Amino acid sequence: MKIAINTGGGDAPGLNAAIRSATLSAISRGWEVVGIKNGYGSIYTDQPFIPLTAERVRGITMQGGTILGTANRGNPFEMPYQKSDGGWDLEDRSDEAVDVFRRYGVEALVAIGGDGSMRIANRLSKKGVNVVGVPKTIDNDIWGCDVSLGFDTAVTTATEAIDKITTTAESHHRIMVVEVMGRYAGWIALHSGLSASADVILIPEIEFSLDSISKKIMEKEARGETYSIIVVAEGATEREGSRFVKGKVIGQAEQLGGVGEYLEKELSEMTGKEARSLVLGHLQRGGTPSTYDRLISLRYGAAAVRALEDQDFNKMIVMQQNRIKRIPLSDVADKMKLVPLDSDTILTAKEIGINLGE
Ligand code: F6P
C-alpha cells in the first residue's frame, strides 16, 4: 500500500503528532508513505510528493505547525489563477490531482483538516480517491466530532491570555475586550471565557445587544467592581448586524476581525469607562500542543491508518463520548458543529452570572 498524507486549512497544534502517528502506523504495516506539501499545492509541481520516513517524523510530536506546510487557498476544485487581463479567477483542477495520485501509485489519502478540507476530501472521494479524514481545527466546529485536534491548546492559550489581561483590567479599572478566534462557532470564547472568569462572553450563536453588555458593566460598577472582562469570538454579531470582515482574498474565506475594536469604542462611549481591546489572532494556533492535543492527534493518525487497512474509505475519524469512531465524510461535509444553546456549559455560564450578550 502507498498512502499520501496532507494537512489543509489553518495550522493547529497537534498536526505534526497526527502526521507522525499515521506515518509510523503505516510503515509498521510495510506501507510506503508520502506527504503532499502546502495543502494540495505540491500536487501541481514537478515534485508532487515528499517521502515520509521514520527519520523524517522523529521528534515532531511536540512541535506546533505542520512539517508539510498548509494552505487556506488551495482547493483543487477552486484553484485561483491569474487571467490574461491581470485579474484573478478560480478553476477546477481536481482531475489533475486525481491523475497525479494514479500516476504515482498513491492508493489512499489521509486528509488532515477542518470543515473545508473535509468538503474537499468528500468531493475527491466521489472522483475515486480513497480518503480518510482526520478532524483538525482550533475552532472545534467540525460536525460529528466531540473534539478536533488543536482546540485544547488554543483554549489554554486564550485562557492564559485572559488571566493576564485581568490583572491590568483590575489595576486600571478598565473594560478589557479580548477577541478570540471562532468563525462560526463560539467554542474557544465560551470555554476560555468561562474558565478565566470573564464577565461577558459573546459567541456567533447568540447575537449581542450593546445595551445588555453595558448594563452588566454598570451593575458591576455599582457593586464597586470597577473592571470588566469581555471575551468575544471573531464571528460574533450584533443583533441585526453582520459579521466584522477585515478582508477577502480570492479562493479563501473572508478574513474576520474588528468586533473587539467595535466593542471597545461603543462600550467606552456608553459607560464612560476606559476600554481597551486585544486580538489574540494566530497566537491561538501556535505553540507546543498540549498533552491532550498530542494524545488525540496520535490516536486520530493511527485510527486513520486502521481505517485504510480495513478498506473503510471515505470516512472521517471522530471522537464521540471518548471513543474513536468513523463516520461517513458525506455526513460531515457542509455541516457545522455550533455551540448548543441548551448545553450545560451555556447554562453554567448563565447560572454563575456571565452575560452572553442577550
Ligand atoms: O479555522 C480556524 C481559523 O483560525 C478561524 O478561526 C479563523 O477565522 C481562520 O482560521 C483564520 O485563517 P487565516 O489564518 O487564513 O486568516
Image (cartoon, helix red, strand yellow):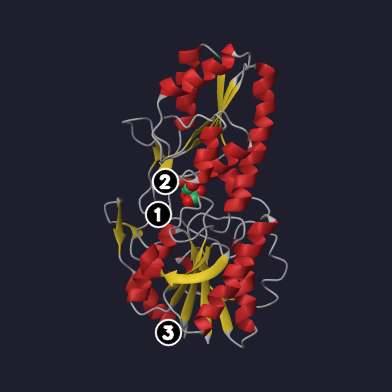
| Residue closest to the eye, 85 or 312 | 312
User: Which sits earlier in the primary sequence, circle 3 or circle 2?
Assistant: 3
Q: Which amino acid, mark 3? A: Arg
Q: Is mark 1 within 8 Å of ligand 1?
A: no
Q: What secondary structure is found at the residue carrying circle 2?
A: loop
| Residue closest to the eye, 75 or 206 | 206
The disc placed on residue 184 is 2
User: Which sits earlier in the primary sequence, circle 1 or circle 3?
Assistant: 3
Asked if the residue under mark 1 is in contact with the one under mark 2, i.e. CB atoms within 8 Å, the reply is yes
Q: Residue at x 58, y 38 (%)?
A: 194
Residue 52 visible somewhere in the drawing: no
For label 3, the residue is 103
Name the image quarter holding the C terminus: top left
Q: What secondary structure is found at the residue carrying circle 1?
A: loop
Q: Residue at x 63, y 13 (%)?
A: 224
For label 1, the residue is 336
x, y (%) of residue 309? 53, 84
